[in-house]
Image: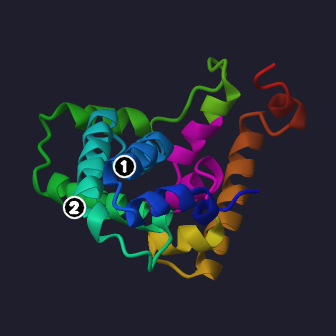
Amino acid sequence: MEKPNERDADIVLRIEAGDLTGAFDLLMQRYESKLYRLCLTFLHDRALAQDAAQESLVRLWRALPRYDGRAALSTWVYAITRNWCLTCLASKRRTVSLSESYVQAEVDALAAPDVQDASDQGHALRQLVEELPETTRRIVTLFYFEEQSVAHVSELVGLAQGTIKTHLFRARAVLLARLESLGLAEIENWTQIGD
């Protein structure tokens, strides 16, 4: 499996050569959808996540000349995006109003998924992941859905690797119990997805 720093070597070479436009084009191709998913994990609102991902790309463009290679490019990209998401969350907490439409979306997101009506079991699993506590949900999303290593998740979330592994272990147990209660824990349910 290709490591993120090996995969990003071409971008780093362009930065070092002064080809910032070419480096940024490659960075966008490689990271744009990942940054959106990371923002969605933090913000739980598609419109806010889209805005945050776009702002993160702008911030990355502005910071690109200062990338010094001390951290892996992917770590640097995710850290800038994470920091912007945390800023957005802090701002969102200060401006919450019960009349705002996203409050209803939050209420809807807390409702238990109706797996009986869900034709996509992968979607049902994603809904169950959304019910996990915030930190655990971020860790599970980064590790399983974004396919980040434990070490990289540790850097992004700011927790020790052992703590990340504990969150993953507990999350798997909770998800399995929830799947069993919904009658979806049988392996046959998951081997047919996408067929």
- Location of residue 62 by image quarter: bottom left
* Amino acid at dot 2: Thr
How far from the left and from the top, in percent, is residue 97? 11, 43
* Amino acid at dot 1: Phe
Return the residue at label 1. 24
Q: Main secondary structure of the magenta part?
A: helix
Q: Which residues are magenta?
A: 125-148
- The answer, for residue 40, to whether it is visible in the render is no
Q: Taking 192 as reference, is 11 left or right?
A: left
Q: Residues within 10 Å of mark 1 (few under 14, many from 20)?
A: some
How far from the left and from the top, in percent, is residue 41? 43, 49
Q: Secondary structure at mark 1?
A: helix
Is 127 contained in the magenta span? yes
Q: Taking 119 as reference, is 154 left or right?
A: left
* The N terminus lies in quadrant: bottom right
Q: Secondary structure at mark 2?
A: helix
Return the residue at label 2. 87
Q: Which mark is residue 32?
A: none
Question: Of the residues tagged 1 and 2, which is closer to the observer?
Answer: 1
Residue in the image at 58% along x and 26% along y:
114
- Location of residue 158 by image quarter: bottom left
Q: Is residue 19 above or below residue 16?
A: above
Q: Nearer the viewer, residue 43 or 150?
A: 150
Q: Residues within 10 Å of mark 2 (few under 14, many from 20)?
A: few
Q: Pointers 1 and 2 in contact (CB under 8 A)? A: no
Q: CA distance from mark 1 to mark 2?
A: 23 Å
- Location of residue 185 by image quarter: top right
Marked residue nearer the N-terminal end (1 or 2): 1
Is 146 contained in the magenta span? yes
Q: Nearer the viewer, residue 8 or 192?
A: 8
Q: Taking 81 as reference, is 194 left or right?
A: right
